Amino acid sequence: MNFLSRLATRLGIGLMKRMAGWPLPVLRRLGVVLGGLLYVLVLPRRRIVQTNLALCFPALPAAERTRLARQTFVYFAQTWLDRSWLWHGSPELLARRLKLHGALHEFEGDAPTIVFSPHFYGLDAGATAINMHIQRRFTSIYTPQANPLVDEWIKAGRLRLGRVRLFNRRDGVKDIVSALRAGEVLYLLPDMDFGSEGTVFAPFFGVPASTVPSIARFARLGRAKVISVVSRLTRDGYEVEVKPMWPDFPLGDLLADTARGNQLLEGFIREMPAQYYWVHKRFKTRPPGEPAVY
């Protein structure tokens, strides 16, 4: 990184720390403005969102898909700004704005447990709420950021409440499985396109999507149950819901088990379609012979 890049990054992180004390309505209004600007100015990313929505919701009128695309940029901006107070706000502030509910009993004891946490924009709020209220150790798999200063800031934010270990995505699975069997909860976010190596093409809204079958693999290796955690942005903060254990999982068929995870995710998305991470090239990797979509 050159001097100007480092300076810009430090100034940006410093601003986020200062914004931690701003009233939430102010941050949310700022997110509306910033999201609107991103929708207009960041044309390549807007095309990705539009392509994803067209593939996943072909029956929706074009005007409705446009509305969803505009709204998803607003949610993207709002949840990014919310990381200011999520990672730098006081515990009292977090307690007021993060509401955790659902099948919390699934965390009781020390049974090997995997959390499927899909890429909704509020996923960091969900992880923070879980770490605040659940007295267990957690592990997760982390992809390092290209900018080392941003990487350090993100890791510090996600580790601020303790009881969390991050494993690099390039590391092997041995230590992760050992931690899982020892009672550490494994937090997985496998609903992104990481290429073709070690993945399967499982349907996602009827479209073959390159999907890491990590939930089924770790559930089998760690003899673990699987639950889901879904985070929803609200006017007052976030609602984080813990879903009950997946019954009869895994079945042993890697493709079928992975398709089941995608099917569950579809149901979550239909409840709040604009809050899903559509800015990602979810269908970047195509089955052999299939044309590119972006």
Image (cartoon, rainbow, N blue to C red):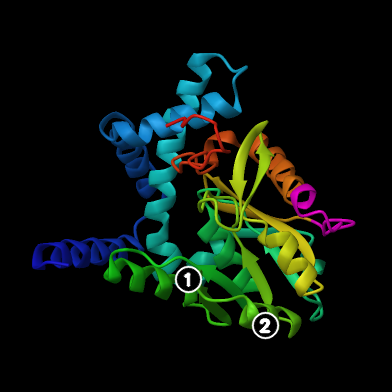
* Camera-nearest residue between 277 and 167: 167
Q: Quadrant of the N terminus?
A: bottom left
Local secondary structure at mark 1: helix
132 to the left or right of 103: left
Residue 25 is at least partly visible in this image: no
In the image, residue 271 above or below residue 59: below
Residue 183 percent coordinates (x, y):
74, 82
Q: Main secondary structure of the magenta part?
A: loop
SS assignment at label 2:
helix
- In this picture, which residue range is highlighted in magenta? 244-257
**Dot 2: within a 10 Å radius of its alpha carbon, few (fewer than 14), some, or many (20 or more) residues?**
some
Q: Who's the residue at 10% across and 63% down the image?
A: 4
Please tell me which residue lies in front, 170 or 223: 170
- Among the 4 quarters of the image, the one containing residue 3: bottom left
Closest to the observer, 119 or 232? 119
Q: Tell me residue 152's x, y (percent).
A: 34, 74
Does residue 149 appear to the left or right of 104 in the view shown?
Answer: left
Disc marking residue 158: 1
Whole-number angstrom distance, CA of label 2 to CA of label 1: 18 Å
Q: Amino acid at mark 2?
A: Ala
Q: Position of residue 268 (x, y in %)?
A: 68, 42
Checking the image for residue 192, the label placed there is none
Residue topped by disc 2: 179
First in sequence: mark 2 vs mark 1: 1
